[in-house]
Image (cartoon, rainbow, N blue to C red):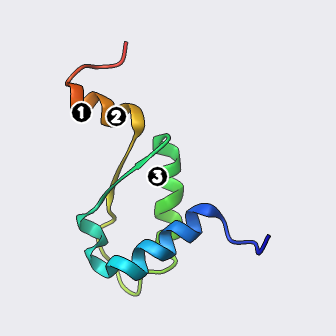
Amino acid sequence: MNGISFLDSVAKTLYQTYGERITDCCLVFPGRRAGLFFQKELSRYLERDIWMPSHMGISQLAEKITGKKKT
């Protein structure tokens, strides 16, 4: 293993692909906590301050699509 985490690899690839347009994206992770760790990794590649892309967990996406809250 080369020491690069999965989230670091994703952050680098997305930033190289979208640049500052990444702020227009909404990313879905298994849970919200992974999204917070992703933002930390992404911040290492930013050349200046920008708005972070929005993110949500899978359960939040399901709630948004169906309009029903998890019980």
- Quickly name the residue at label 3: 35
The tag earlier along the polypeptide, 3 or 1, is 3
Residue 16 or residue 39, whichever sits in front: 16
Circle 1 packing at 10 Å, graded few (<14), some (14-19), many (20+), is: few
Q: Where the C terminus falls, by quadrant?
A: top left
The tag earlier along the polypeptide, 3 or 2, is 3
Secondary structure found at label 1: helix
Q: Are marks 3 and 2 in contact (CB under 8 Å)?
A: no
Secondary structure found at label 2: helix
Q: Are marks 1 and 2 in contact (CB under 8 Å)?
A: yes
Circle 2 packing at 10 Å, graded few (<14), some (14-19), many (20+), is: many
Identify which residue is drawn at 40% across, 87% down.
47
Q: In x, y percent, where is residue 31? A: 49, 40
Res 9 quadrant in image? bottom right
Circle 3 packing at 10 Å, graded few (<14), some (14-19), many (20+), is: many
Identify which residue is drawn at 32% across, 77% down.
18
Q: In x, y percent, where is residue 24? A: 23, 65
- Quickly name the residue at label 2: 60
Viewer-side label of 3, 1: 1
Secondary structure found at label 3: helix
Farthest residue to the left: give it.
Answer: 67
Amino acid type, mark 2 = Gln
Compared to residue 24, the image places residue 34 above or below, namely above
Is residue 64 toward the left or the right of residue 57 in the image? Answer: left
- Mark 3 → mark 1, Cα distance in angstroms: 17 Å
Q: Where the N terminus falls, by quadrant?
A: bottom right
Q: In x, y percent, where is residue 64? A: 24, 33
- Quickly name the residue at label 1: 64
